[in-house]
Image: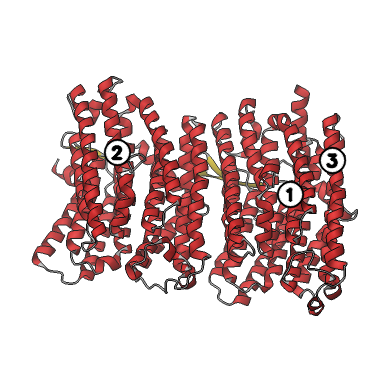
Amino acid sequence: MITNLSALIIIPLLFILLLLFSKDKLLIKKISLFGAIVQLIYIIFILIAYINQSHKEDFTFINSFSWFKSLNIDYITGIDGISISMLLMTSVVVLAGILVSWKIDFRVKEFFILLYLLSTGAYGFFISLDLFLMFFFLELAVIPKYLLIAIWGSGKKEYSAMKLALMLMTGSALILIGILILYFDTQLHTFNILKLTETDIPVETQRISFPLIFVGFGIFTALFPFHTWVPDGHSSAPTAASMFLAGISMKLGGYGCLRVAAFLMPEATIEYSKIIILLAVIAIFYGALATLMQKDLKYMNAYSSVSHCGFILLGIGMLNQTSINGAVIQMISHGIMTALFFASIGMIYERTHTRKIEELGGVIKSMPFIGSVFMIAGLCSLGLPGLSGFVAEMTIFIGAWQNDGIFYRISTIISCASIVITAVYILRASGKAITGPVKNSEFLKLKDATIAEKTASVLLVAVILIIGFTPFLLINLINDDTFIISQNFLKVLSSK
Amino acid sequence: MNLDFFRLMLPELFLILIIFILLIIKIGDFVKQNTYLINIVNILFVLNIGAILLCFNNGELFSGMYISKSIFSFEKLILVCGSLIIFLLSHHWLKNHKHLAEFYILIISSLLGMEYMISSGNFLMFYLGLELASITLAALVNFDLEKKKSSEAAMKMILLSAFSSGIMLFGISLLYGTSGSLDFDVLKNSISANKLNIVALIFVFSGFAFKISAVPFHFWTADVYEGAPISVTAFLSVISKAAVVFVFISVLSPLFNNLYFLWNYLLIGIIALTITIANIFAIRQHNVKRFLAFSSIVQAGYILLAISANNSIAQSSAIYFIIIYLFSNLGVFAVVSAISDLYNKEEMKDYRGLYKNNPMLSWALALSIFSLAGIPPAAGFFGKIFLITSGAFTGNYALIALAVINLVISLYYYLMFIKKIFIEENEYPIEKLKPGLNVYLAISTCVCGILIIGFIGEIFEFITRLFVN
């Protein structure tokens, strides 16, 4: 059967096996590229099959068997509109990431195997419908990140890698406690998400379990007081790893917050929604302000990721369909946009050996392509209409404005205001580093992007433009599923 | 009856047979070369594994003194397999040892004692097995005959081991005093919450806590592990520990079922202490063997977590974890012993830059370490999560939270080790190792075990079914 989702895990594993037995560096790169293309094509197949299916259910292409019977752990995979769009985003970022790391020369085989392992974790996470399976894939992605940063990274890489690994593991530890509470406090004793949605989880259980799971996933997606791994981790990582980290890995957290915390426990989500919004707004505003202070391009983008991921949590916290739509679009838009950003910063760094805004200048003169890519990513980040960032943030704001009450109004206004700050740092950075006067005449001799880098950038820019100009494609895809989530909230609210 | 004797006691009889063969070889000096002797023992052990596989029988001998159940046979199978892997991984050390036959006789006697301990139906039999297992172990610790540290460790071990046996014996005598019997079946029903029994429980429990080296009875562990030859350290930390856990599960838990509440409190205290304190100590170690000693204490704490739940799923997950722990820990020991035997390097700092010349060995070591740390896709992840899930049966979420947070702390020191191997620079990194076929066999068995066991749910189901039968 063509729509067996387990293939999404098996394909990368097969390519890892192939990589293990290949010696030549160029061959390894070609195999990894080929694998990423196969995966992308397969996901497009699934997307087409998903759109063409006759009857719409919550989850489709379900494939399940009992894994550890006496513990009631099942292997269940299935997708809905949200997860398929996440899968698509992941495969695009993976492909771009592999293209960008074409020049890597140190421990090539290990590098690509770890990238594959990381992406396997992400694919598996998005398709699993069992909390245990989900947890397995979430943890699977942690150690590759550690090794990628610690071995191939730059700067204070060992410190950053350790910080990232320990913080993410703390996050997954909280998630583990949360799902164990869910497991033991419901009568079914199951990790199965499909069965858990049908049962009523007692409100007392939700009150304990929700914060654990939400904060746990929140650590992955830079929830405010737990965001400190993001700047260090992202800026120390090699280019492809930063793209994966910000593009894919942080979305694991957002998706988990939505799928596990908000979807399974609507009562608790409503009770805690104000706290979520508060933390999200702090993240948005504080992240934006902190970005203003950065002198290093990678640190700048990392802090702006904190700010942008705050929008995801804001969208979830606002509890209506439009805002949740916005949160999902923001996840995808930010994934692509930040990958593009890191890719262009990586290209600049590789050539000029500096990421300091002060030391750069006039990049666009010698490297017009890279300069323009940087500008596009920046403009997307500040929400220029026609690019995906605008669609995502606009949808979240519209959704947020639907909630009456002074608290919601103020938080929305503060979040909107952060866009102005975003404009300041983006325009300042691109004005100084990309278009400004040439500081170092050495830079004029540098070569522009290679074909591989151009392909990667064009791919990412294309996705940004597609979402920017035809957002209805994406919204139609996720609409039914966000409707179910928001309907859950409405049911609880009306019963009160 | 006669046939039953052979049928039920086959695992032990086979070991006794091996011991006799070795004695005859030694006396007659039939085998001159160590390599031949190693091969003979390895083949005999493979045959032993086959024999145990054939005899998953239920029954009892000597009017209930010796009990055979299929779960016991399975536990013995684990012990024998583990010993075989240890023989393989310490091939280099064994090959050059002057008293090889004695080494084998002692280590197999210890194994025999453990098997009798598991199968015992009476405290007399149990104590006999326990002493046979621990006295021979003390002699084994001393087997690096030229090293002063080795003798010191053996001295420490024999003194403390005798002390703990004494305490346990005192507890057993109190039990005998209240019930007039040493038979587990009789004791099971006669134990009640009177003061004498509670004191007895605490004494017996302390004896066991010593054997499993739980905090605060752990002080001997690091020194003994450091002083002993690596094969013996591996035996101590895997086989001996596994045997004690098996006894915990199948003998002690049912025996003190009437005092479960007290039993549980003792366990909770010990678990919390063990995983926290051993974790903190593990961070500060510079010697690989001491590091592994503390890491194995932490693992023991997690196993006790499952035992505290006292139901069949929890007990299955403890045994499941033991299998995984065996492969992971022996995987680490295989690499450590190769480096120690060939280059005599045992400090953590010697491992810097190991990856440069030994990529395959480094990955095997890393995989084993990840398995110990409970990181997927290594089997240790499944083992750890099931232990924690079983622990949550009791509803004691504070303890679960402590256990889970300690997982993060333990990740720190395991990653520090990984960092040394893969990232740090070394002026004189360890050269390319060629440890030989036997060691490669041991390492690949461990790696395959770590990669495969977790994903096959059927193994877990098999253990659960054994408990029901």
Q: Can residue A328 be seen in this view?
A: yes
> Measured from the top left, where is residue B441 in percent x and y?
36, 65
Q: Compare marks 1 and 3 and give the one earlier in the sequence.
A: 1
User: Dot 3: within a 10 Å radius of its alpha carbon, few (fewer than 14), some, or many (20 or more) residues?
Assistant: some
Q: Is mark 2 on a helix, strand or loop?
A: helix
The residue that label 1 is drawn on is A306
User: Dot 1: within a 10 Å radius of its alpha carbon, few (fewer than 14), some, or many (20 or more) residues?
Assistant: many
Q: What element carries label 3?
A: helix
Which of the two residues, B197 or A445, is positioned nearer the viewer here? A445
For residue B380, above or below residue A451: above
Q: In which quarter of the image is residue A341?
A: bottom right
How far apart are the alpha carbons under marks 1 and 3? 16 Å
The subunit letter for the residue under badge 1 reads A
The residue that label 2 is drawn on is B208
Direction from residue B229 to residue B277 in the image, left or right:
right
Residue type, mark 3 in image: Ile
Residue type, mark 1 in image: Val
Q: Can residue A54 be seen in this view?
A: no
